[in-house]
Amino acid sequence: MRSFIGLALLSFFAMAHAGELAPLEAAKIQYLITAIETLDQAVFIRNGTGYDAKTAADHLRLKLRNAGSRVRSAEDFIKYCASVSSVSGEPYKIRFADGYTVTSEAFLRGKLATYRLP
């Protein structure tokens, strides 16, 4: 009987954590993607080519879908999806209208630090 209960609990735990983001982490990731998508007049540099905000956000959504269960948190999203090119290993950068350039990792970590529950 004990082993049955143990197996049932283990199965429940595995199912509860398989492939689904916790709602708070999903909200944080959406917040980060929206922060990118709504930057006015910014250029997102990926592998030496500049992209607009909408294209950059779409690319991050695609990388998030492809990352699957590797992404369990907003920190994982930044690390695995939004910091460097999986093709070249080059960091993603954001160049603002005033010419200031920052890595997307630094920008997103700053945004994550300001996240507040809705």
Image (cartoon, grey):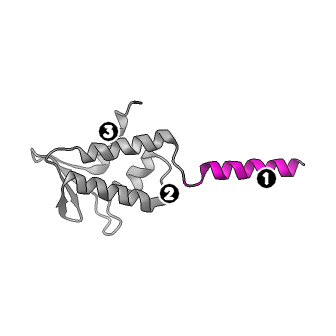
Could you say which is closer to the camera, residue 118 or residue 94?
118
Task: State yes or no: discs 1 and 3 in contact (Cβ < 8 Å).
Answer: no
Q: Is residue 41 depicted above or below 61 in this figure?
A: above
* Nearest-to-viewer mark from 1 and 3: 1
N-terminal-most mark, 2 or 1: 1
Check residue 70 in the rendering and tell me which mark sits there, or answer none: 2
Distance between the alpha carbons at the discs numbered 2 and 1: 25 Å
* Number of numbered callouts drawn: 3
Query: What is the residue that sits farthest to the right in this orientation?
Result: 1
Residue range of the region highlighted in magenta in the rendering: 2-19
Q: What residue did someone put label 1 on?
A: 7
Query: Quadrant of residue 58 in the image?
Result: bottom left
Position in image of residue 39 (x %, y %): 20, 44
* Nearest-to-viewer mark from 2 and 1: 1
Instruction: Determine the residue positioned at 31% across, 39% down.
Output: 110
Check residue 111 in the rendering and tell me which mark sits there, or answer none: 3
Residue type highlighted by circle 3:
Lys
Instruction: Determine the residue positioned at 21% across, 58% down.
Output: 45
For the C terminus, the quadrant is top left
